[in-house]
Image: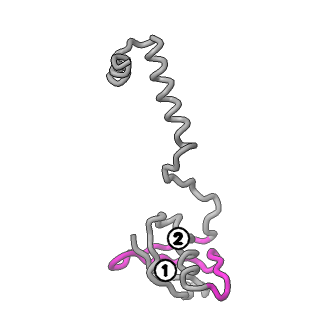
Amino acid sequence: MNKTLKSYFYWTYPRGSFHYDVMVTLILVFIFVTPWVWDYGAKPSRMAGPQHPIQVVSSGHGMIVSLHASDVAIPEGAGVQETRKLLRKAIEPVTGDAVSVDRWETATDSDGKLVWKIWAHR
């Protein structure tokens, strides 16, 4: 038994043998089954994104992200934490999910449309 395990570990069996096929099968099972069992943290890209371009400008300690207010649905009377969470989710396609929202304000763009200016950092 110990010799068999050592042979599997050092991969000493010739190609085409029963033990070689067992090892290859176990590797393939590991490759194709583990994504269904374990969460590796990979997230699929979102299909529905913002309808307008998102502008990102570097600031001294992070970035300033500008996006149209129509691309973010923030309910009236939303608290600070809920607003922060929704704004972070809205800028996630551009900044990634490892970003923190520091502060935000509303402004108007050159067309007179309402935009969110969001200060964030990684």
Estimate the x, y position of residue 110 in percent, counting from the top left.
55, 85
Q: Amino acid at mark 1?
A: Ile
Estimate the x, y position of residue 9 in percent, counting from the top left.
35, 24
Q: For residue 91, which numbered disc appears in the image?
A: 2
Q: Is residue 111 above or below residue 65?
A: below
Classify residue 73 as left or right of residue 20. Answer: right
Q: Nearer the viewer, residue 91 or 27?
A: 27
Q: Earlier in the sequence, mark 1 or mark 2?
A: 2
Local packing at callout 1 (Cα closer than 10 Å; few below 14, some 14-19, many 20+) is: many
Local packing at callout 2 (Cα closer than 10 Å; few below 14, some 14-19, many 20+) is: many
Report if residue 75 lies within the magenta region: yes
User: Mark 2: which secondary structure?
Assistant: helix
- Name the residue at 46% across, 84% down: 103
Q: Is residue 69 above or below residue 14?
A: below
Asked if the residues shown at circle 1 and circle 2 are in contact, with their CB atoms under 8 angstroms apart, the answer is yes
- Name the residue at 57% across, 53% down: 44
Classify residue 10 as left or right of residue 88. Answer: left
Estimate the x, y position of residue 15 in percent, counting from the top left.
42, 13
- Give the residues drawn in magenta, as a range: 52-78
Q: Amino acid at mark 2?
A: Ile
Q: Is residue 122 above or below residue 7?
A: below
Q: For residue 66, which numbered disc appears in the image?
A: none
- Name the residue at 59% across, 78% down: 68
Q: Which residue is mark 1?
A: 118
Estimate the x, y position of residue 84 in percent, counting from the top left.
53, 79
Q: Nearer the viewer, residue 107 or 118?
A: 118
Q: Which of the 4 image quarters holds residue 63?
A: bottom left
Q: Quadrant of the N terminus?
A: top left
User: Mark 1: which secondary structure?
Assistant: strand
